[in-house]
Image: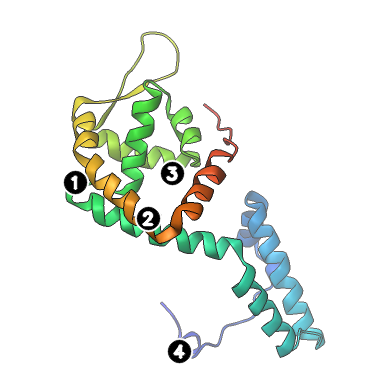
């Protein structure tokens, strides 16, 4: 629960170097370490009166606004995902579930780790999404007599669902190509094909 001071936007200063929780997080996640170091550097500049001026801040904001690849990629992803969500919704499928079913059908007997690598997802996200598909009965995970690998295959229900949803997927493809243009759509396909497959344990 926030305090009256916090509701007014007033917060006690935090010494990030003395906070075990934050330090533990930065060690576990290097990107957080970089973010925290940048933040601490800015706080030190503020204390010494050497913080960047308004002109410098405006320049940085303009640079990110005009050139940031992450922002643009995420914006394109949100718009494209919305198109596919609208088309696949009548079938009770999300775009990520549809893509996952296609990967499962293509690999035909892959392990959880192999499916996660093919889908460019980290392990916890892949496990969560796979479990939803398995719980729906769209795929089956076999328990082999020997070995640790548990192959996952698409079920008859999952196969029927893919067949039924294909016209909706094709309609979404047409709308997306119209929005991106032929060159834009081709560029996304080529860039995606060139992405390295991340290694996962298991």
**Residue at figure coordinates x 54%, y 65% from the top left:** 71
**Residue at figure coordinates x 56%, y 45% from the top left:** 191
Quadrant for the N terminus, please: bottom left
Q: Residues within 10 Å of mark 1 (few under 14, many from 20)?
A: few
- Marks 2 and 1, the one that precedes in the sequence: 1
Q: Using the rendered image of the protein, determine whether residue 17 is visible from the camera's viewpoint.
A: no
Q: CA distance from mark 3 to mark 1?
A: 22 Å
Q: CA distance from mark 4 to mark 3?
A: 38 Å
User: Marks 2 and 3: CB-CB under 8 Å?
Assistant: no
> Which image quadrant is residue 15 in?
bottom right
Label 3: which residue? 125
Secondary structure type for disc 3 = helix
Label 1: which residue? 91
In the rendered structure, the answer to whether residue 162 lies left or right of residue 32 reads left
Q: Position of residue 96 (x, y in %)?
A: 36, 46
In the rendered structure, the answer to whether residue 139 lies left or right of residue 185 reads left
> Which image quadrant is residue 55 in?
bottom right
What residue occupies the far front of the structure in this picture?
182
What residue occupies the far top of the structure in this picture?
146
- Marks 1 and 4, the one that precedes in the sequence: 4
Label 4: which residue? 4
Q: Nearer the viewer, mark 2 or mark 1?
A: 2
- Marks 3 and 1, the one that precedes in the sequence: 1
Question: Closer to the camera, 165 or 97?
Answer: 165
User: Marks 4 and 3: CB-CB under 8 Å?
Assistant: no
Label 2: which residue? 176
Q: CA distance from mark 1 to mark 4?
A: 48 Å
């Amino acid at each position: 629960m926030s305090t009256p001071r916090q509701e007014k936007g007033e917060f006690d200063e935090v010494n990030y170097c003395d906070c075990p929780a934050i330090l533990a997080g930065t060690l576990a996640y290097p990107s957080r370490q970089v973010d925290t170091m940048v933040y601490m550097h800015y706080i030190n500049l503020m204390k010494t009166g050497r913080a960047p001026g308004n002109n410098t801040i405006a320049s940085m904001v303009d640079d990110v606004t005009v050139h940031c690849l992450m922002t643009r990629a995420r914006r394109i992803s949100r718009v494209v995902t919305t198109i596919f969500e609208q088309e696949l919704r009548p079938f009770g499928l999300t775009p990520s579930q549809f893509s996952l079913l296609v990967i499962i059908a293509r690999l035909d007997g892959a392990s959880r780790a192999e499916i996660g690598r093919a889908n460019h997802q980290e392990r916890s996200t892949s496990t969560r999404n796979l479990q939803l598909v398995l719980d729906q009965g769209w795929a089956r995970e076999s328990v082999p007599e020997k070995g640790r690998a548990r192959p996952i295959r698409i079920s008859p229900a999952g196969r029927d669902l893919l067949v039924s949803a294909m016209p909706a997927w094709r309609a979404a493809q047409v709308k997306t190509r119209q929005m991106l243009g032929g060159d834009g759509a081709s560029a996304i396909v080529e860039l995606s094909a060139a992405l390295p497959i991340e290694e996962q344990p298991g």
